[in-house]
Image (spheres, coloured by chain):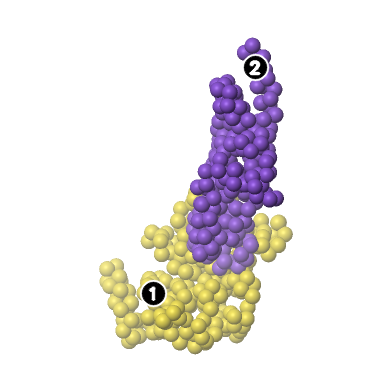
Amino acid sequence: MSAVEFSRVHFRIGPRTILNDLSLTVEPGETLVLLGRSGSGKTTALRLINGMQMPSSGEVRIHGKSTTAWDPVRLRRGIGYVIQEGGLFPHFTVERNVALIPALENWPADKIAARVSTLLAAVNLPADSFARRFPRELSGGQRQRVGVARALAADPPILLFDEPFGALDPVTRFDLQREFLRLRAELGKTSVFVTHDVQEAMKLATRIALLHEGSLAFLGAPAEFESSTHPEARAFLDVLHEARRAQ
Amino acid sequence: MLSDELQDILQEGVGLLGEHLILVFTAILIAAAIAIPAGLLLASRPAARRWALGIAGIGQTIPSLALFGFLIPIPFIGGIGRHTAIVALVVYALLPILRNTVTGILGVDPILRDAALAMGMTETQILRMVELPLAAPTIIAGLRIATVTTIGTATIAAAIGAGGLGVFIFRGIASIDKLQILAGAVPAALLAIAADSALGWIEKRLG
């Protein structure tokens, strides 16, 4: 069974069509990158997965069950969500931010504590020096790492990333991309990753879904993407080739 | 003798200060019990919010002496005495608390609300764990404004027989006795300053 399945999904706001007849699947363990310009509908597609939006027509199925049939709280607790700058709660310490969902799920305290230190170690923020800090006492890259740890906390099988590295400096972004690949190899989570950065897409994706004005312009592995003839794909590939030439 | 008069004032003053404190505390507690929950409800309802803030605003524009007077002939809530004064003080305290509660909740970064929802928090959990703690300093600031103004306005309550430090002030005005006026005004002012610093301290601690 696919982890995520879009079946003829349309999403409209009034007269505007944001997503037009989107059909695709995300298989367990893969990283599907939703690539597209601003306004292409990629973030909307992501928000349809965790039921933050509901399709105007068609169906989004998670583990085979339509998002309209899921209890939204149960659905979302099984899907980790990482946003830019982590979206951390400023009045919670790093520890409490990461422990939030396990605590709401009534895990015993010792299990939560163990989970928090495991996760902070996994994102290279040793609990000893970071657990009691507040988000404002962290750098952007560190906040982003905490955001990843928080999304992983209750061990959800699916992870969503909404342009998580967009606001970071190039060096930090490079580090975090490398760690994303390492964590993926270790944890084998199903991930859907939104970005407008074609280099990031090529680097992280097992498959790329290119969205153009709400429609799927390309779907396939990064190697196939390079030979796509779709004009929107060519536009992104020009950027990629330009960047490679500059290197 | 001056010292006799001072002694009388001191004796009577303790009782009046106590009455004053009861007036202010009761009014603020009732106003907070109405305005904070109302503010939480109104934060997500823009149309109702405009109406409620408008009505609470009108309540504040009524001159306080007139409001005390208006309330006297009204059955149940009106009449002579403490409870009428409390009703009037509640009317004045509502707006700052209501407005600051709404402002505090609306001031919480919408990204945090969105992230909380996407993580699978329920509306109640978001309110209790995210919105209220982050809005707390602004809500306390509203309580602070309401408390300080209520301490001042409560002196007028003596005009309708509600007691409090206003008794000295009205008596002093009637008998042209500066000492009596000061005996009411100075403790009221000190009380306002004390309440202001205490609530300011809490506001800072939370912020």
Position of B197 relative to B176 (above/below): below
- The foreground one among A160 and A228 is A160
- Subunit under mark 2: B
- The foreground one among A125 and B146 is B146
Helix, strand or loop at mark 2: helix
Position of B90 relative to A140 (above/below): above
Colour of chain A, in one word, is: yellow
Q: Point out the image quarter for the N terminus of chain A.
A: bottom right
Q: Residues within 10 Å of mark 2 (few under 14, many from 20)?
A: few
- The foreground one among B74 and A42 is B74
Helix, strand or loop at mark 1: loop
- Name the residue beneath numbered marker 1: A39
Position of B62 relative to A167 (above/below): above
For residue B81, what is the image quadrant?
Answer: top right
* Residue type beneath disc 2: Glu
* Residue type beneath disc 1: Gly
Instruction: Give me the residue at 59% from left, 35% from top.
Output: B155
- The foreground one among B168 and A165 is B168
The image shows residue A210 at horizontal and vertical percentages of 40, 80
- Subunit under mark 1: A
Instruction: Give me the residue at 50% from left, 63% from top.
Output: B46
The image shows residue B53 at horizontal and vertical percentages of 52, 56
Instruction: Give me the residue at 70% from left, 29% from top.
Output: B15
- Name the residue beneath numbered marker 2: B5
* Tag 2 and tag 1, C-beta contact below 8 Å: no
Q: Is residue A200 visible?
A: yes
For residue B201, what is the image quadrant?
Answer: top right
- Judged by depth in the image, the label closer to the viewer, 2 or 1, is 2
Instruction: Give me the residue at 37% from left, 72% from top.
Output: A38
Q: Which chain is purple?
A: B
Q: Is residue A149 visible?
A: no
